[in-house]
Image (cartoon, rainbow, N blue to C red):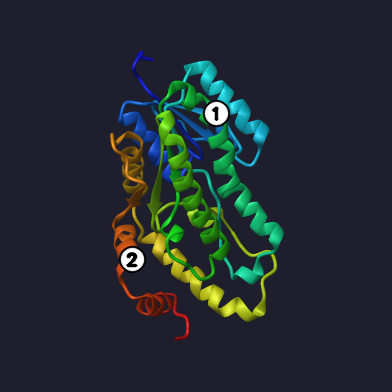
């Protein structure tokens, strides 16, 4: 490794957005370490080292971060990408199931960030890029738990950025919209489905499949991640595609009642 080459760590790098981000960071000149719960099964990527890391396990996180430091001596960029989807009406998910989603999507981000921060503070430099979602800024019927995790990541990240600036560390958010990945396959269904929601749930699942099929490419989101990791004066939020940019403006400027009506129409909910 060249003395000036920076090190980037990408969680959940074996598929989808994480994989695209790892490749894009290599192309941007980083030494890249990608993580997966089972790194031995990850598709080899040119220039990417893979390590086992389960964001839901504190010991797994600590072991992986220690190994990165042992190999490379530093971590300049952390991309918190690992996550899981969930669908179904809010009432259909037990508290235990909701806790499981939060444990990965929110507390997983916190575990990895807490493990990396002492390194970045000692370096007096670093960049943390957290994957949020368009659902971190708008509601989504039949994805309430997932949307709640992304709203949590938004609040955590913006607050953390203010805490870390004096140490030379910045935090940014990337907000993908529907993306053409295997997200649907990694989405858990409600553990206590109820007949009252069955019809609307089915309509939503068909809507979701269509949105993913015609969604942005993972490379589009990866481009935003690289910008968040490398911009000299980083923005707090990067749109992971044109639809996020449009919806973000609508959320700010369209009257609340009109936005509400459009959301219900899009999701084929009764007016």
Q: Quadrant of the N terminus?
A: top left
Could one spot residue 127 in this view of the protein?
no
Residue 47: image location, x then y, percent: 39, 25
User: Residue at left 28%, top 34%?
Assistant: 232
Quadrant into which the C terminus falls: bottom left
The answer to whether residue 91 is left or right of residue 156 is right
Tags 2 and 1 touching, CB below 8 Å: no
Classify residue 84 as left or right of residue 91: left
Residue 71 circle label: none
**Snapshot quadrant of residue 112:** top right
Residue at the (35%, 14%) spot, across then down? 2
Residue found 67% across the figure and 75% down from its top: 194
For the point 41% across and 77% down, the residue is 260
Tell which residue pokes out farthest to the front in this image: 166
Task: State the residue position of label 1.
Answer: 51
Q: CA distance from mark 2 to mark 1?
A: 41 Å
Query: Percent position (x, y) of residue 50?
Result: 51, 29
View extreme (bottom): residue: 271
Position of 102 relative to 39 (above/below): below
Say few, some or many: other residues with alpha carbon within 10 Å of mark 2 (under 14 / 14 to 19 / 20 or more).
few
Query: Considering only order in the chain, which callout, 1 or 2, is on the residue closer to the N terminus?
Result: 1
Q: Quadrant of residue 229?
A: top left
Q: Position of residue 127 (x, y in %)?
A: 41, 34
Query: Would you name the residue on which mark 2 appears?
Result: 252
């Amino acid at each position: 490794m060249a003395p000036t080459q920076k090190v980037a760590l990408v969680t959940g790098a074996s598929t989808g957005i994480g994989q695209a981000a790892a490749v894009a960071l290599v192309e941007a000149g980083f030494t890249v370490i990608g993580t997966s719960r089972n790194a031995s099964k990850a598709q080899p990527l040119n220039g990417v080292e893979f390590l086992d890391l389960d964001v839901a396990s504190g010991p797994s996180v600590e072991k992986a971060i220690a190994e990165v430091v042992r190999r490379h001596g530093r971590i300049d960029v952390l991309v918190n990408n690992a996550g899981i989807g969930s669908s179904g009406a809010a009432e259909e998910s037990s508290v235990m199931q909701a806790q499981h989603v939060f444990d990965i999507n929110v507390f997983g981000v916190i575990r990895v960030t807490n493990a990396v921060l002492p390194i970045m503070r000692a370096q007096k430099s670093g960049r943390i890029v957290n994957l949020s979602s368009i659902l971190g800024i708008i509601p989504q019927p039949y994805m309430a738990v997932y949307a709640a995790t992304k709203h949590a990541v938004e609040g955590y990240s913006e607050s953390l950025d203010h805490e870390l600036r004096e140490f030379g560390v910045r935090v940014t958010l990337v907000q993908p919209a529907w993306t053409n990945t295997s997200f649907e396959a990694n989405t858990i269904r409600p553990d206590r489905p109820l007949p009252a929601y069955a019809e609307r749930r089915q309509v939503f699942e068909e809507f979701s499949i269509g949105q993913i099929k015609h969604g942005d490419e993972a490379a589009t989101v990866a481009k935003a991640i690289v910008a968040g990791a490398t911009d000299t004066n980083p923005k707090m939020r990067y749109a992971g595609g044109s639809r996020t940019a449009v919806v973000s403006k609508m959320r700010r400027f369209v009257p609340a009642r009109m936005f509400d009506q459009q959301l219900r129409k899009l999701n084929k909910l009764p007016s």
